[in-house]
Image (cartoon, rainbow, N blue to C red):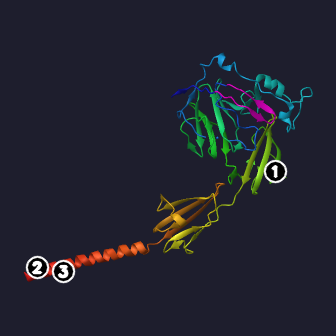
Amino acid sequence: MKKTFVSYALTTILAIGGITLSSVTAPIWPSAPLNAVYAADGLGMDTGSTEDDTIYDTDSLDDSYYEDYNTVEEGNDAYFDYTGELDIYTGLPVGVEEASQAGIVKVNDDCTYDLTNHYFVYQIGADDKFCASVVDGMVTTAPVNFAAAGEFNMAIYKDGVKLNGIPQTVSEPGSYTAITWDDNSEKQVMTFQIVKSTTGKLAQYVIPSGFSVQSVEIDGVEADKGFGMVDMTREGYYDIRYACNATGIVYNLVVSVDHIPPQITIDGVDKNNKAKGPVTIQGLQNGDSVVVYLDDKKTSLKSGNKLTESGTYKVLAYDQAGNVTQKDFEISLYLNIKSVFLFIAFVVLIAGIIVALYITRKRLRVR
């Protein structure tokens, strides 16, 4: 197994719901957090790699690496959507002042929040930590960052497929799962989902443990906040705001929900999904993409969205929201212009061979 020293620096200024993070130099934090409400972009990730069975090692760090740490400025504005109990002396959520002095806040039974580096921290072992810019169960549209301290085994899966090593950042849409293991057992650390800003992948949003919904708007109109779950079966423009109960920091997920798949038709196919000649794919819109398989092999789509070769077809049409429509059909063997020319050429060839054999045989008889 390979030991990887995780050391990155960041210098960034972010406005995080009233909290300002500036000029931070952090040896084990790959980049600035992308979770809190600093834009209407939601939360999110991209792929990089090390080794499949990565062991993180930060034991060689010395105190000099931490000399440039800046503290987070915490003002009351950071908690303007907080609805829990407030400290009567500071005006902040109860426990935040004490926790911020230590730099760590407990979010739920599984993780804490690092107020200095703005990461959700999962304790793997006594001295081992896995950190992410999103919490377990979050849905986001922005890249997601990872960091770690200590030595442990870790793997990241995207849509059930293991990534090659542990990326610093992930951004491609999909469902992600972080797994750790030792010689005796395997444990799921966290899951999260990255979606496009226009998506058909969400029918509901179950708010992560330790968070509370502040408001839900659909097409600019306030909607029911639900009880820990936001229904997203209705199409429209969603702005979901929710806060961490421990820190008061407000997060939002802003997406356009589209559940309608592409409305395509295959012109030239009968009711039995068979065609005796070329077919045309109709109904594609701007932004739609098409994948075509002929006899289970991927093939290209001709100009004019026409398919001419005989065989069994599977056509998959995707829209920008990720919705898909599938059409299966068969084009029977038929005579097109090319086939006619080939047939005539074949007949002429056979006729020529017969004539040649006849003449040769006749000459042999004459002799």
Rendered position, 225 above or below 136: below
Task: Specify the segment rendered in magenta.
Answer: 9-25
Quadrant housing the C terminus: bottom left
Residue 358, disc = 3
Q: Residue furthest top?
A: 63
Q: Residue furthest left?
A: 367
Residue 264, disc = none
Q: Residues within 10 Å of mark 3 (few under 14, many from 20)?
A: few
Give the mark nearer the N terminus: 3 vs 1. 1
Kind of residue sitting beneath label 2: Leu
Give the mark nearer the N terminus: 1 vs 2. 1
Measure the C-alpha gap from mark 3 to mark 2. 10 Å
Label 2 element class: helix
Residue 217, disc = 1
Which of the pair 340/196 is nearer the observer? 340
Whether the magenta-drawn stretch holds residue 13 is answered as yes
Residue 170 location, x and y as percent?
62, 40
Kind of residue sitting beneath label 1: Glu
Residue 112 location, x and y as percent?
73, 30
Task: Tell me the residue that label 2 is attached to.
Answer: 364
Residue 334 location, x and y as percent?
44, 74
* Residue at image point 70% right, 49% down: 197
Residue 313 location, x and y as percent?
51, 65
Q: Please identify, in this view, whether the residue under mark 1 or under mark 2 is nearer the observer.
A: 2
Measure the C-alpha gap from mark 1 to mark 2. 96 Å
Measure the C-alpha gap from mark 3 to mark 1. 88 Å
* Residue at image point 73% right, 50% down: 255
Whether the magenta-drawn stretch holds residue 334 is answered as no
